[in-house]
Image (cartoon, helix red, strand yellow):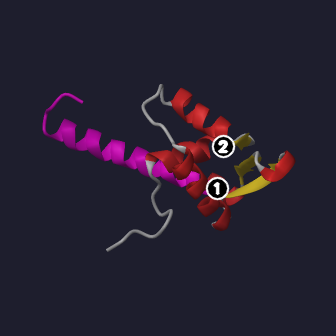
Amino acid sequence: MPREKFQTLTEQMFYILLCLRETCCGADIMERVRAITNGRVAVGPGTLYHLLDSFVGAGMIEEVDVGAGGRKRSYRLTAAGRRALAQEFDRLNRQAADYRRCILKEGEDA
């Protein structure tokens, strides 16, 4: 059964939303994701702009500024985006807790 869009977030989705707690343009988002994850996660421009359009369509982010010529667009989280980010954080924490509980139950090192 396919998952509902945005029911869970991919790593790239999570980090894009995390970056958009502050207003950012696309280039800033790509740089911040790399910095936050110490280079472990990268978001290419094709993926980034597809996700930004999807997030705008879902009401999770909003476009707040369009630079000269319409090329540099800036975005920020909406209340719905903040909720989605918090829900994903909670989901990841529950997974980590389940892992710890199972590992400790089996007597393995956590």
Looking at the image, which residue sits at the far bottom?
1
Identified at 45% across, 46% down, the residue is 11
Residue 80 location, quadrant: bottom right
| 34 vs 27, nearest the viewer | 27
Which quadrant does the N terminus fall into?
bottom left
- In this rendering, position of residue 19 left or right of residue 7: right
Q: Which one is nearer the viewer's eye here, 105 or 15?
A: 15
| Residue occupying the far right of the picture | 68
Q: Dot 1: what SS?
A: helix
Checking the image for residue 17, the label placed there is: none
Mark 1 neighbour class, 10 Å CA radius: few under 14, some 14 to 19, many 20 or more: many
Hey, what amino acid is under mark 1? Gly
Identify residue type, mark 2. Gly
Left or right, 85 with reference to 12: right
Residue hosting label 2? 26
Q: CA distance from mark 1 to mark 2?
A: 17 Å
Q: Quadrant of the C terminus?
A: top left
For disc 1, the marked residue is 81
Spot occupied by residue 97 in the image (x, y as percentages of width and height) = 34, 43
Label 2 sits on a secondary structure element that is: helix
Tell me where residue 32 appears, x and y as whole percent.
60, 32
Mark 1 vs mark 2: in front = 2
- Residue occupying the point 48% across, 37% down: 42
- Tell me where residue 19 appears, x and y as whole percent: 63, 40
**Mark 2 surroundings: few (<14), some (14-19) or many (≥20) residues within 10 A:** some
Range of residues picked out in magenta: 83-110
Task: Tell me what residue is drawn at x 55 percent, y 27 percent.
Answer: 35
Where residue 90 sits in the image (x, y, percent)? Answer: 48, 49
In the rendered image, which quarter is residue 108 located in? top left
Q: Is residue 108 magenta?
A: yes
